[in-house]
């Protein structure tokens, strides 16, 4: 049979964000894959050098449409480290609360995208319906569903009133029931198993050599979670498990994410229980003393790294962002050859790419 | 006068006009049921009609390298053959043109749209179309054999190869589905394969091939394709109702159409239920389940049927 070239993207129903994947196939079997990114490059790292530190909080919130909170958390942490500021405990807890709510909605979004890619529209609809609960909670807390503007340098902008805490508790309980339903559904459903088990296998060696991070790495047997390895904000005082699995296929990536949602729910409940009083933020000077700093956060997709260098002015000299999607983009063209064309959808959706994050 | 009456039958009831209106209705019913199953609201009742009219009015674009004549001919041929098949199948108590052996003609006519669908993919310059066409052909070989076997079983059982004859043989609630349940299940699976619905929506798997063979279709031609799918659904269901569910029970002659309609709706609900409950299979899984599970079951059903006839 002759070779055919299947272009996937920059515009394709499989892709939620533009990237170009060119597959070479013989019949239905993929023999090679190459990828091109950069379609949503916005030059954010250069833009931020022309804006003040305060303005940049809002700029970095817009790096990603899903994990906006964790970007500002990492950025604010970096600037606070340069300033030598200690944020109030209440602010640290609220940052954790927002980050975990974001993780929940990101993982559920991923589940929906995966389900749609393998043609299971019902799970897609259910996952996105239940994701609304979390988005509504975030809107209730911050006024925004996706861009929350919750973090400011020196603390947070938003508080959590006791009514809001009660609302959160109630809604999260409803949500936990829904997640039990999902877990049972994915455990039992054979058609979901047939499309995800033993598909897109990634070994622990690949994880290490490409530097894959986050749930994708943890489903291949890696047990690194920045929340545990280098705790930040209020994570040192919160109890949670680092979920990992060893199968390394799309199925185990789904399992790890579902279990992580349960852990995030527990963290949210702990935060609501133990939320300390006090101020929301401390004052921060406009000018940042010279120096450089690297901070890490656990974004929904894995380790997010911010490097900030200051020259003593009110604008940063250089900021470098390393998003968790980058190693996944590199590893993916090695996962695809040898697969059926139908599995490309499962692997691509299962990789949980955030192209806007990676392009910036 | 008789010619006029016959013409009215062909063009209006239970022929073309009825088939189109009823197929749009069951398309709406199906979409509504699937939507409710997925936790959505679903479209209003006139949506399929609105979609059809909108597409008919849209600009017809075909990319360079398409064979214009063939790509225009294919949807027309599929629609015509589907409707012609509909004329041999009873609707309620009435049927336009029944004859002995029409079951074979119906099955032949119903397989033409699949071949046209394959060609539709093949004549476009789009790689999605070509791959979707290949897949639809491979799928055709996997489901068509069990489907033929599942419909041959009641024919052997009742010793008639006419759809109307099959319906008559089941009068007095001696429905084939009670005697040949495996055959009915196979026929349902085969019908889902023929209609390319979940879990057999492989030729137009959205996340891989866009719209498959129909990727480069637009305007009127796409409208005809969409209508063909609706008609195929209705005619396929009509066939199953007549062959397995007793059609319109002639005991209550005046209620024939109502009884038939209830059975059609029942099967639409079944199709919608399957649509909501499964993920799409891979093409290799489809071929495997077709030949390893469905065909042996079909053979088993045939053997049992012949043995039942002897006894």
Image (tube, helix red, strand yellow):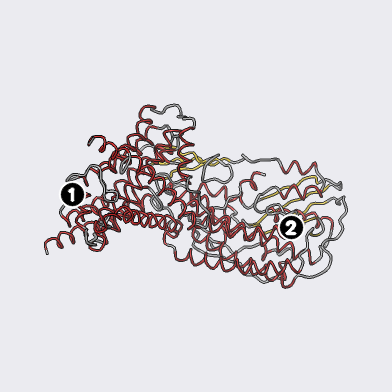
**Left or right of B76, for residue A134:** right
- Secondary structure of the residue carrying tag 2 is helix
Question: Quick check: marks 1 and 2 in contact, CB under 8 Å?
Answer: no
- Secondary structure of the residue carrying tag 1 is loop
* Disc 1 chain ID: B
The 10 Å Cα crowd at callout 1, few under 14, some 14 to 19, many 20 or more, is many
- Which residue appears at 84% of the width and 56% of the height? A83
Residue receiving disc 2: A142
Q: A270 and B78: which one is in front?
A: B78
- Which residue appears at 49% of the width and 57% of the height? B36
**Left or right of B27, for residue A220:** right
Residue receiving disc 1: B161
When asked about the image quadrant of residue B83, the answer is top left
**Left or right of B25, for residue A167:** right
How many labels sit on residues? 2
Q: A328 and B55: which one is in front?
A: B55
Q: Position of residue B140 (x, y in %)?
A: 31, 46
Q: Position of residue A323 (x, y in %)?
A: 65, 51
Q: Is residue A235 above or below residue B56?
A: below
Q: Position of residue A266 (x, y in %)?
A: 64, 70
The 10 Å Cα crowd at callout 2, few under 14, some 14 to 19, many 20 or more, is some
User: Residue A273: which disc?
Assistant: none
Q: Is residue A74 above or below residue B118?
A: below
- Which residue appears at 70% of the width and 49% of the height? A321
């Amino acid at each position: 049979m002759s070779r055919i070239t299947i272009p996937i993207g920059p515009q394709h129903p499989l892709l939620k964000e533009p990237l170009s994947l060119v597959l070479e196939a013989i019949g239905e079997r993929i023999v090679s894959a190459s990828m091109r990114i950069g379609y949503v490059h916005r030059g954010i790292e250069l833009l931020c050098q022309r804006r003040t530190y305060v303005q940049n909080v809002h700029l970095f919130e817009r790096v990603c449409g899903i994990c906006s909170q964790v970007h500002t958390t990492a950025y604010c942490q970096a600037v606070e480290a340069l300033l030598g500021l200690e944020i109030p405990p209440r602010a640290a807890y609220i940052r954790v609360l927002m980050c975990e709510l974001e993780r929940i909605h990101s993982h559920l979004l991923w589940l929906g995208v995966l389900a749609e890619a393998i043609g299971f529209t019902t799970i897609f609809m259910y996952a996105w319906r239940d994701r609304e609960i979390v988005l509504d909670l975030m809107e209730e807390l911050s006024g925004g569903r996706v861009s929350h503007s919750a973090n400011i340098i020196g603390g947070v902008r938003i508080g959590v009133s006791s009514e809001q805490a009660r609302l959160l508790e109630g809604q999260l309980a409803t949500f936990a029931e829904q997640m039990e339903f999902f877990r049972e559904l994915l455990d039992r459903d054979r058609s979901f198993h047939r499309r995800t088990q033993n598909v897109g296998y990634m070994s622990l060696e690949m994880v290490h050599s490409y530097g894959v991070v986050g749930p994708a790495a943890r489903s291949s047997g890696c047990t690194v979670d920045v929340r545990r390895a280098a705790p930040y904000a209020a994570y040192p005082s919160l109890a949670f498990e680092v979920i990992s699995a060893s199968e390394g296929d799309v199925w185990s990536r789904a399992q790890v994410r579902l279990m992580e949602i349960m852990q995030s729910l527990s963290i949210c409940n702990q935060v609501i229980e133990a939320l300390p009083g006090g101020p929301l933020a401390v004052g921060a000077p406009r000018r940042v003393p010279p120096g450089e700093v690297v901070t890490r956060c656990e974004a929904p997709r894995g380790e997010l790294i911010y490097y900030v260098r200051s020259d003593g002015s009110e604008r940063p000299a250089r900021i470098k962002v390393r998003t968790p999607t980058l190693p996944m983009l590199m590893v993916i063209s090695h996962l695809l050859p040898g697969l059926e064309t139908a599995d490309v959808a499962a692997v691509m959706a299962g990789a949980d790419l955030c192209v806007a994050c990676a392009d910036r | 006068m008789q010619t006029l009456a016959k013409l009215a039958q062909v063009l209006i009831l239970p022929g073309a006009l009825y088939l189109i209106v009823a197929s749009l209705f069951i398309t709406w019913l199906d979409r509504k049921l699937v939507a409710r199953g997925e936790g959505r609201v679903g479209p209003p009742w006139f949506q399929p009609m609105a979609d059809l009219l909108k597409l008919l009015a849209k600009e017809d674009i075909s990319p360079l390298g398409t064979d214009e004549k063939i790509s225009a001919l294919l949807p027309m041929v599929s629609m015509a053959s589907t409707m012609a098949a509909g004329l041999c199948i009873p609707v309620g108590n009435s049927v336009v043109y029944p004859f002995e052996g029409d079951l074979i003609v119906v099955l032949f006519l119903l397989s033409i749209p699949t071949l046209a669908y394959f060609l539709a993919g093949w004549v476009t310059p789009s790689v999605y179309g070509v791959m979707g066409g290949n897949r639809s052909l491979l799928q055709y070989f996997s489901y068509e054999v069990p489907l033929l076997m599942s419909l041959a079983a009641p024919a052997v059982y009742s010793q008639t190869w006419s759809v109307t004859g099959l319906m008559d043989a089941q009068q007095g609630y001696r429905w084939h589905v009670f005697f040949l349940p495996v055959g009915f299940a196979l026929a349902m699976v085969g019908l889902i394969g023929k209609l390319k619905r979940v879990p057999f929506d492989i030729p137009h798997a959205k996340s891989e091939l866009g719209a498959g063979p129909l990727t480069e279709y637009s305007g009127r031609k796409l409208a005809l394709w969409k209508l063909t799918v609706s008609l195929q659904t209705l005619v396929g269901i009509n066939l199953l109702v007549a062959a397995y569910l007793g059609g319109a029970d002639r005991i209550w002659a005046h209620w024939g159409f109502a009884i038939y309609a209830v059975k059609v709706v029942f099967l639409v609900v079944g199709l919608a239920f399957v649509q909501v409950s499964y993920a799409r299979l891979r093409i290799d899984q489809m071929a495997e389940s077709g030949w390893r599970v469905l065909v042996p079951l079909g053979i088993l059903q045939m053997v049992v049927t012949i043995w039942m006839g002897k006894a």
